[in-house]
Image (cartoon, rainbow, N blue to C red):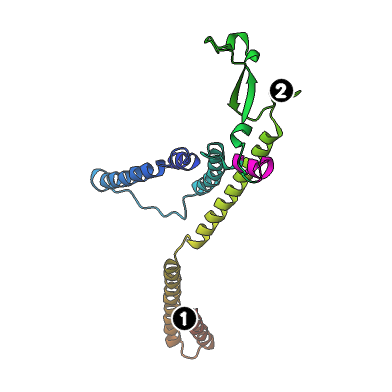
Amino acid sequence: MVIQFGFITLFVASFPLAPVLALLNNILEIRVDAWKLTTQFRRPFAAKAHSIGVWQEILNSMAILSVVTNAFIVAAHLRHDPPRILVYYYAYSENEGVSMSGYISSSLSVFNVSDFMEKSMPLENLMNVTQCRYRDYRYPPEHEKRYLHTMQFWHILAAKMAFIIIMEHVVFVVKFFVAWLIPDVPSDVKARVKREKYLTQRILHEYELSRLQEKFREKNNCAEVDKEVIATKGKVQLSEAM
């Protein structure tokens, strides 16, 4: 179950249908296990457990790690790539009237065909093509830093990291808010637990009171027994008030 939870949460952005398939699998598994336990095997002995132990911490850690991995996956495979667009819009747009004018050209770098290595040279006739364009942010061949990443590339990388950090914090806030909103123990269960403790204490105090009253009947003039009876009555009244 932990392995399944890891596959679902850590890489859910790559295959969003995985949780639905896991849900169907778990429903089927529960019914098959119920059929086996009720008809095929001897009923196991019930054992109380306070929690699932260390597996709780493993699942919590995996849930936190899944936020980070999915944020990186989303940032690396955004369809319209908002960080690129926003960086160009706010930092590199030169035309004030049409802010996105020239965006396609700025996102393409220039490569000299003559710079191909001999083993990488295309076999087809390039019809006197001397340059080609490709999607990247690198300096042109005539620049002193030829084919190295431009400053725009680093600005876009910083914007992607900012997007990852913002997305992580938003998801963490939602996660902790939902965890706070939905308590581990419902309020009606807490009330029943308190009621059970109260009834247990009352039964014990009443038993102790009846035992002391029997002693009192046996020893009518015993002052100590009288004090014990009064103290036990006080305990009963205190438990009722609680």
- Dot 1: what SS? helix
Residue 94: in magenta span = yes
Q: Residue furthest front?
A: 97
Question: Where is residue 71 shown, x and y percent of the image?
Answer: 55, 43
Q: Is residue 232 above or below residue 138?
A: below
Residue 212: in magenta span = no
Q: Is residue 124 above or below residue 65?
A: above
Question: Where is residue 123 shown, x and y percent of the image?
Answer: 53, 9
Asked if residue 168 lies left or right of residue 194, the reply is right
Question: Where is residue 117 shown, x and y percent of the image?
Answer: 63, 11
Identify the amino acid type marked 2. Arg
Identify the amino acid type marked 1. Glu
- How many residues crowd around disc 2 within 10 Å: few (fewer than 14), some, or many (20 or more)? some
Question: Magenta residues, as a range?
Answer: 84-96
Question: Where is residue 77 shown, x and y percent of the image?
Answer: 53, 36
Q: Mark 2 or mark 1, which is nearer the start of the sequence?
A: 2
Q: Residue at x 61, y 44 (%)?
A: 98
Question: Which is in the foreground here, disc 1 or disc 2?
Answer: 2
The quadrant holding residue 65 is: top right
Q: Could you tell me if residue 58 is visible in this image?
A: yes
> Mark 1 = which residue?
240
Q: Residue at x 49, y 81 (%)?
A: 241
